[in-house]
Amino acid sequence: MEARTCRKRFGVAAGVMLLLAGIVGVVLAASVVGDESGGRASSWALQPVGSWVWTTDLGPLGSVPVLTTFHGDGTVTVADGFMFANPLAPPPAQGMKRGPAHGVWRHTGGRSFGGTSLWLSFDGTGMVQGWARSRSALELVDRDHFEGLVYIETLGGCSTTPPIGCPDPADPDAEWTPSPIMPPEGFPVSATRIHRLPLPE
């Protein structure tokens, strides 16, 4: 009787172990995807999470260097080359500055993802002037490169005299103005992932 009970318990335990092994196998299989060469790669390798050297292509005007970090929680932070001055702005606006951008990103299918970021614009004296917004549609070319489009808009109207305040950038009726030098579909962008480099020997 005792031997039969032990065998029964062993059978239940073995069944549970097989079930768990099957679940783990499914999870592992789901975490592997093919790369562009037809090989296999972990799914994390095809995620944008990490820091990137981003370039916004302005056509004949040149390009803007950008540092972007996509966080695992779906947020993004950005600093770009026009934060402290914009050489393309008309003379009265040469001293304008803008703060770092904060936003969100999410997958939109396959290797495609996109985000929306906001930052504040300031005049030469440091007074807030308004908001700026970027919307992006991006696609991973491989684990270390992506490309796509970014659409940039501004929302002015901040008051620096009482009553002070700025328009609500989340208001669906807010009147955003597209960048006047932007192509209709947006600026082309590309980026390369930043990797850890060892110290020189």
Image (cartoon, rainbow, N blue to C red):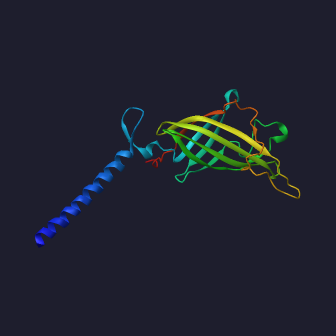
Q: Position of residue 143 (x, y in %)?
A: 46, 39
Based on the displayed image, in which of its 4 quarters is residue 185 positioned? Answer: top right
Q: In the image, 15: left or right of 69? A: left
- Seen at 51% across and 39% down, the residue is 109
Q: Position of residue 8 (x, y in %)?
A: 17, 65
For the image shown, how many numbered marks are present on the structure? 0
Q: Position of residue 113 (x, y in %)?
A: 55, 41
Q: Is residue 65 above or below residue 102?
A: above
- As rendered, which of 7 and 197 lies closer to the eye? 7
- As rendered, which of 1 and 47 lies closer to the eye? 1
Q: In the image, 160: left or right of 133? A: right
- Seen at 19% across and 67% down, the residue is 9
Q: In the image, 35: left or right of 17? A: right
Q: Position of residue 83 (x, y in %)?
A: 71, 46
Q: In the image, 182: left or right of 160? A: left
Q: Residue furthest top?
A: 60
Looking at the rendered image, the quarter that the N terminus falls into is bottom left
- As rendered, which of 24 and 178 lies closer to the eye? 24
- Seen at 21% across and 60% down, the residue is 14
Q: Residue furthest right?
A: 162
Q: Residue furthest front?
A: 1
